[in-house]
Structure formats: C-alpha cells, structure tokens
Image (tube, rainbow, N blue to C red):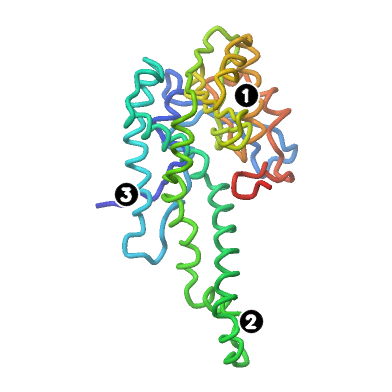
Amino acid sequence: MNQPLKHHYLPVFYLRRWVGEDGRLVRYHRPPGRPDGKVVTSRVSPDYTGFGEQLYTLHGASAPQMIETDFFSPVDNAAAPILDHLIAHGPASLDKTQRWYLARFVHSLQLRGPHSLTEINAFVERNLRENIERLDGPAYLATKQEGDPDSVFDDLLEHSPDEIANTGKMFLPGLIEHEFIIQLIINMRWEVMDLSAATCTLLTADRPYTTSHGFCDHSCVLTVPLSPIHLFTAANDIGQLQKIAAQKADDTVRDANKLMTELAVQNVYGSTDSHLEFIEQRLRRHTEPPVPGLITRD
C-alpha cells in the first residue's frame, strides 16, 4: 500500500469550507522570488496546499509514516463530522466524547504546522543536548580521540542523525493529546459565531489557531475560523464571549482577519480575492521573522 507523503497540517476537510464553485480557494502569499515582494493570489485546491512533503515522516524508522497514518488521520477523521455538527447545531449539542475529539483537533492546529514543528524540534534538541552532555559528556571527553566530534551530542548527531531529527516529531502526539491542556479547552465556554451579516468574510491561514492569553488566564480567548462566516470562540469567562457577540459583525471579522494575517508564516486563505490590500498591509515579509509560537514564547 502506498504511504502518504503529503502531510496536511491544514486538513483538506477544513480548507474545503473556503472553496468556490470551482472547488478551489484563494491563497494569498508573497512569492520568494518576486522583486517587489508583493502579495499575490492564486486559486488552489485544498488537496494541493496546506501540506508539507513528508512533514511527519520518521526517517530510518520501521514505520516511517506512523504519525501521519496512526495519529493525524484518526484526529482529522474523528473531527470532520463533529465540526459539521458543531456548526449546524452549536456547542450545546455535543456530548463529552465529541467535545474531547474536537478539543484535540483544535489543539492540534496550534502544533502541527511546519513552523511549530521547527520550534518543537529546536526546543527538544536543545534540551536533549543539555541532558546528554550533563549525563554522558564527562565520560566522552575523558576518552575522546583526536578527530572525534567535540562533544558526545555531536558524536550522536554524526552517527544517528535520523534519531535526533525524529525526536521532536515523536513528541507531537503527546503534546497534542496533553491531558491537562485538552481538559482546559474542554472546560472553556464554547461558541460558534455566525458572521454572515458582515460585509467581508473570514480568512484562515497556516496558523489558524489563536489565543489571547495563557489557558489558565481568566481573560483567555481562543479562536479558530471554521468557514468564511463561522468563527469558533472559546473563553474561560463568559463575559469575554458576550463582549465579542456585542460587537458589530464587521468589527469581529476585521479583528479576526487582522490577527490571522499577522500570525501567518507564509499563507493566508480566503473564499474570495477581495482581501488583497488588507493582507498586503499585514502579512509578514520574508525578511521579518514569524511571530513566535507557543514553544518559543517568553
């Protein structure tokens, strides 16, 4: 059986909510080779965007695609029908199991993208280096020969590069299913806001998950655009949801789109090409670093 090599960090079922009659959605991005650095648009199929080639592949492992096939596929397959149900009937209609599956999916959107995975890999490698050097470094240096790598970790990198490269990826399922974080999301007050009254539509991006504060903060608000007119919001304080609900729909869409575009690493997506000027003013340029994610945030 052919193993999947295109690993979607933005699931196809999720992006399909932005497609038009031609089965495509609008991708906004700054092409690296464009001299003026301007944002351009293109119509793309959900199957051919929002993925990384072998993004979760465990190179050198006996089951190299296990994270994609045994973890992310079940995560997405479980969430897809629940997301339909959530939009149609609201959060109160979900049972405990559905709420857990959806909380897991929402949390996965924070960690599964290429930029987040790079952050996780760097964090894990740094800590792995510190621990290995602390435990095994003195013995290695005591027997080190001329021409050997400078440290025990560098020696490990030289002889077992795949094991080091795979370590961060192996942490992904545990980070995403972190019981404490999942329960915090489940315990928040959920709402799906219908913003069809707004004069413009919601955008999504390669980092579609946003939080205003840490999960344990009373003021925390979590948002994920679910379609051009539906915004998932969750908060610890119902007053925060009431405040958003009291805004004009245009203001809520503008605020959500601004945050979505400013957090994007490379790609923003919409159902139309009418957002070009708005995104041009806010999408980062290649010379600017992405906004830090959860792992690198102080």
The amino acid marked with disc number 2 is Asp
- In this view of the protein, which residue sits in the foreground, 126 or 274? 126
Mark 3 → mark 2, Cα distance in angstroms? 38 Å
Q: Is residue 285 left or right of residue 139?
A: right
Against 48, residue 277 (above or below) is: above
Q: Residue at x 72, y 38 (%)?
A: 37
| Image coordinates for residue 233, horizontal then vertical, percent | 52, 23
The amino acid marked with disc number 1 is Asn
| Image coordinates for residue 183, horizontal then vertical, percent | 44, 37
Against 248, residue 117 (above or below) is: below
Q: Secondary structure at mark 3?
A: helix
**Mark sitting on residue 150:** 2
* Among the two numbered marks 3 and 2 on one chain, the one whose residue lies closer to the N terminus: 3
The amino acid marked with disc number 3 is Asp
**Mark sitting on residue 275:** none
- In this view of the protein, which residue sits in the foreground, 256 or 221? 221
Q: Secondary structure at mark 2?
A: loop
Mark 2 → mark 1, Cα distance in angstroms? 48 Å
Determine which quarter of the picture holds residue 265.
top right
Label 1 neighbour load within 10 Å: few <14, some 14-19, many 20+: many
CB within 8 Å, label 3 to label 1:
no
Label 3 neighbour load within 10 Å: few <14, some 14-19, many 20+: few
Q: Which residue is mark 3?
A: 70
Q: Is residue 29 left or right of residue 166?
A: right
**Mark sitting on residue 257:** 1
| Image coordinates for residue 214, horizontal then vertical, percent | 60, 37
Residue farthest left in this picture: 1
Determine which quarter of the picture holds residue 266.
top right
Q: Is residue 140 left or right of residue 90?
A: right
